[in-house]
Amino acid sequence: MIDKAAIEEHIRGILVALGEDPDREGLRETPDRVARMYEEVFAGIGLTNHQIAEMFGKTFTAPEDSSAVVVRDIGVFSYCEHHMALMYDMHVNVAYLPHGRVIGLSKIARICDMAARRLQIQERLGADIAEILMEAAGTPDVGVVISGVHSCMTARGIKNATARTVTQTLRGAFREDRALQELIREDRL
């Protein structure tokens, strides 16, 4: 559970430490606004991967001749655990092989969104999405490719505005099967 009162107190302290007056008109409500924003954007912090799989695990009987299910270009954002900097313009490609069950397509996007609502690194986000989908859809065969921009690289430090980070997480048949890997390639984002 997120402690909004503590966040408000600390944000007020950060404003003072920055040399700002937290009582001036434009900043008076900022600690409350930031606390409410954190409650929203970090909604996944208090949830385990198992809990997310249970939340979005509605499945249906798969047709006998089911092939790979692919959902491309799922937009998410997250926050880097190293700088608490925004990871943005993130696009996720997800694919899985049904093993008797298929999961609702909107549930795949919801899994990606909720997994992204944590402090983390992009590599872990891909692994978490794969783990959650494996459990929710009941399949060991999952592939996840994420492409995103990290403000810890674009707005500070190296300040390289064009750098994109691409990660892939391959489980089960996606580890070895090149044709399956082609389904979720980053350059198809």
Image (cartoon, helix red, strand yellow):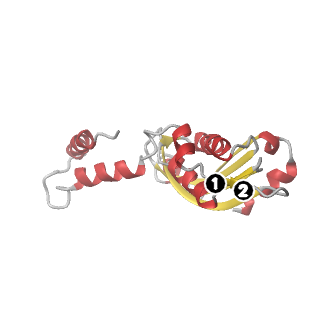
Q: CA distance from mark 2 to mark 1?
A: 7 Å
Can you identify the residue that label 2 sits on?
186
Is label 2 in a helix, a strand or a loop? Answer: helix
Other residues around mark 2 within 10 Å, as few (<14) / some (14–19) / many (≥20) = many
Which of the pair 96/83 is nearer the observer? 96
Question: Of callouts 2 and 1, which one flags the residue occurring earlier in the amino acid sequence?
Answer: 1
Q: Is residue 88 visible?
A: no
Q: Position of residue 43 (x, y in %)?
A: 42, 47
Q: Is residue 29 above or below residue 81?
A: below
Report crowding for label 1: few under 14, some 14 to 19, many 20 or more residues within 10 A (C-alpha).
many
- For this view, does 55 lie left or right of residue 187? left
In the rendered structure, which amino acid carries the disc numbered 2? Glu
Dividing the picture into quadrants, the one containing residue 147 is: bottom right
Indicate the secondary structure of the residue bearing disc 1.
strand
Q: Nearer the viewer, residue 14 or 120?
A: 120
Do the numbered discs 2 and 1 sit on residues whose CB atoms are within 8 Å?
yes
Q: Residue under circle 1?
A: 147
Provide residue 3's location: percent of width, then percent of height.
29, 39
| Residue sitting at x 56%, y 38% | 50
Q: Is residue 77 left or right of residue 189?
A: left
Could you say which is closer to the camera, residue 65 or residue 40? 65
Residue 181, given in percent of the width and then of the height, sits at 80, 51
